[in-house]
Amino acid sequence: MDVNSKPEFRLSSPSDFFKDLEAQLAAMRQKAADALPGSSWSPLELNPNLPPERADIVIVGGGVVGWSIAYWLKQKERVRGEVKVVVVEKDTTYSQASTVLSAGGIRQQFSLPENIHLSLASADFMRSINDHLGVLNEDPIDLQFNQSGYLFLASEQVAHIMEENYSIQRNVGAKVRLLSPTQLKDKFPWINTDGVVLASYGLENEGWFDPWTLLNAFRRKAVSMGVFQCCGEVTDFKHLTNMVMTADGEHLPLRRIQSVKVQMPNSLEYQPVECAIVVNAAGAFSGKLADMLGIGFGPKNTIAGIPLPVEPRKRYVYVVHCPDGPGLDTPFLIDYSGVYFRREGLGGNFITGTSPEESEEPNTRNLDVDHQFFEDKVWPSLAHRVPAFEKLKVTSAWAGYYDYNTFDQNGIIGIHPLINNMYFATGFSGHGLQHSPAVGRAVAELILDGNFQTLDLSGLGFRRILTQEPMMERNIV
Amino acid sequence: MLKVLLPTLMLIPTTWLVPGKWLWPTTLLHSLLIALISFTWLINMSEVGWLSLSPYLATDALSTPLLVLTCWLLPLMILASQNHTATEPLNRQRMYITLLTSLQFFLILAFGATEVIMFYVMFEATLIPTLILITRWGNQAERLNAGTYFLFYTLAGSLPLLVALLLLQSNAGSLSLLTLTYSAPTQLPTYGDKLWWAACLLAFLVKMPLYGVHLWLPKAHVEAPVAGSMILAAVLLKLGGYGMMRMLTVLEPLTKELSYPFIIFALWGVIMTGSICLRQTDLKSLIAYSSVSHMGLVVGGILIQTPWGFSGALILMVAHGLTSSALFCLANTNYERTHSRTMVLARGLQMVLPLMTAWWFIASLANLALPPLPNLMGELMIIVSLFNWSWWTLALTGTGTLITAGYSLYMFLMTQRGQLPMHIIALEPSHSREHLLMALHLLPLILLTLKPELIWGWSA
């Protein structure tokens, strides 16, 4: 080291300033914009993720049903900014959400007219989705809606159910066609029609689409219309309880939610959101939310003792690759044995799976996939029905939760009799995604108009659960 | 005057020393007694001249109605606040009542002041308890914004007033209201004098508020707790009107020309804010804008400077004070039950709370100036005096009356009629306290129909 040399200091001379003039001026402008009114700088350091202190409607659950309700609430309000809507989602990566793990199918082949109407309305919505959910200056939405139809195969024992369902579906307006085994073989030569007596094929508005795109389309449009989104978990409710005596002399606790406690992720920070209405669209986790309010913890044989019959059920989906498999017009095939498959993409990949027996339900602690299940339960029936699938390779698999309605496997839409201001839109047991646009509109009509306007879904309300009259789908599987 | 001031002052130690469970009944009774004592000012109302005269405080026919309104409002505020402060710790409740009482104290001093500087100081002093009420007990994060708007709009308006008053003091030698009316009209030829004229009135116009500088009012009213909204709507706005009426005596002869734009602003504001009311979704915001609308008419009546104009303005101020306060109380009963101020989420309430509907009906009718209530009398006198000045104002005031009827009915029909949504079927029944509150608002209004001499000021 040279002792004679002076230590080097960097002096900020005027020439330094002028060297980077553009950047310096931009920085000064930025500072001025931050300081003047109109910028979002505030002396209080608030967590930007916190929900507002009060909102009109809090939607718990940021899946496709939750965002659909948020969109329709904003769509139906008559003055801009009429209702303040907050959507609370506990996991914005959607790692366990049923929406994005769904196979994404939509069908009208139900036996309940309500379900058929819901699917028809949702299919209409999705066909013209850019008219509804298009945002100016943003990319148009491509749902990749493959309208390849659903194909149900019925055996001897269940053929009569299929025929009755067919007439209901045609009455309501679904475009479905019955096929005999020969017609089936004609149309889809790769099917082994062994044991198949009747087939029901959807000609229009049936198929599959990309659930992630639909979710994001709803979310983008709703946020552009002013819905607040918040990443957090609802851990508690603050409510007022009134004891009411019914005409039979029964004492019922009527609860009215005053505020919702939203806990920030990985933090002790929470925000109580004072609200007028709470919508339970939490999907597989709706039961947990209902437990927080004490639904189902009353004495047995009273209304207060009936819990919300929604619990998570794990379902596996396997992606298989079969180059000799069925071609591009493959419908979403559902066999009477319960096995289903559909084409995925254009490279000879297929998605397949089946519902396990009631006694063999996998535990729902996590979303690990049981590959043995494929070997034991899925592959044999699949290969039997489609001989080309004897030679296939499982490339990947995942598991997702159904928000399974243990009572009658159909959605619950409406207000709970004991919680004055909580609306439910849950329990769809595997067909929530396909009904989401119409369900969103129905719940928005309930909230803003006071009653159903376009579709009368009062059959799907809580009444059937209280009177213990299940509205079961007459399935062939 | 001391017979009202000292009990009001002593209400503060009372709130702090009373045991917890007697806090609200005691303060209610105490303030009710103060209100009843304040009625003694109403004797000899037909006399022109000062009563309860002392060198510093006095009452006359202009300030007495407003003083009585102020004293009447304190028990009503205490009645209205009892429910929503019930969950707070006791000392905070005491603090709340102390703030309301101190506000009352400053307001009595303001209305009773004989010296304009004292009026100014009290005018400013009322800002502080109101600001604390809004920012501490308001409901949402926006209350900080509301407090800032409220404080700075009013301060920005009143700083020129201070300068103007000091100028007047140095010119006229005294600012005592007792002698100000007898001073010789001054020559005010220069532009500086015109600026001085504007400075004298700006603070009161902001306070009234005049359309154009009214932005603080919807924010402050909406974010304030119910007692804050009540006192703001009922009395604090009237401080502006009262100040204007007092100051106009020294502002001759400039007012004849210079008031022109302000009258037009006021009348245009009646229509504009009325139209805004028609598209409001927030109930309190609707009532706040309706306040701006009515006060626009009052500003017009005051600036026109005729006996009927002044009389109409005073009647409308008192009637509007009672009506607006009643509407805010009704909106609060809604809010306490549904926790939302959005009108679309709380409709069809006639099915659930029919007795409250009766109060809603009377309050809405009063708001739209139904005869024979004093609201109509005040409005008619102002409209007539404006018409006398210029026939064209009839177009503006007529449209304003029409729109007022429109939004008052809209508010009533939206909240009471229509399909009852499913989430407000089981609401808490109306408390007797709420019925008492509404009765104490609306009964005096109805009784004033029978003896309007109490509130029509100097026009004996």
Image (cartoon, coloured by chain):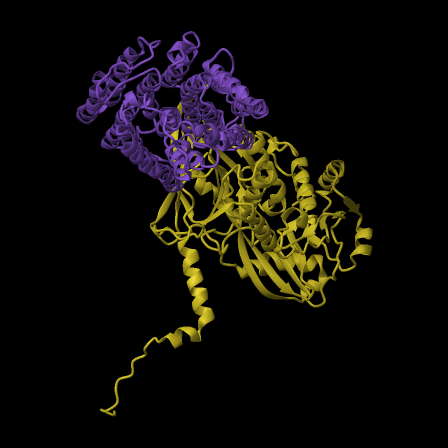
How many marks do you count on the picture? 0
Please tell me which residue lies in front, A148 or B5. Answer: B5
Q: Picture coordinates of residue A233 (x, y %)?
A: 42, 47
**Quarter holding the N terminus of chain A?**
bottom left
Q: Quadrant of the C terminus of chain A?
A: top right
For image coordinates 39% across by 76% down, the residue present is A16
- Residue A108 can be seen, yes or no: yes
Q: Which lettered chain is shown in purple?
A: B
Horizontal placement of B267 versus B230: left or right?
right
Give the percent coordinates (x, y) of residue A211: 60, 53
In x, y percent, where is residue B396? 57, 26
* A302 relative to A84, above or below: above
Q: Nearer the viewer, residue A252 or B91?
A: B91
Tell me if A203 is positioned left or right of A261 in this view.
right
Q: Which of B156 and A325 is in front in this view?
A: B156
Identify the colour of chain A in the image.
yellow
Q: Position of residue A34 (x, y in %)?
A: 42, 56
Occupied quadrant, residue B455: top left
Is B47 drawn above or below residue B135 in the view shown? Answer: above
Q: Which of B400 and A66 is in front in this view?
A: B400
Q: Which of the 4 quarters of the picture holds residue B125?
A: top left
Q: From this viewpoint, is residue A248 visible?
A: no
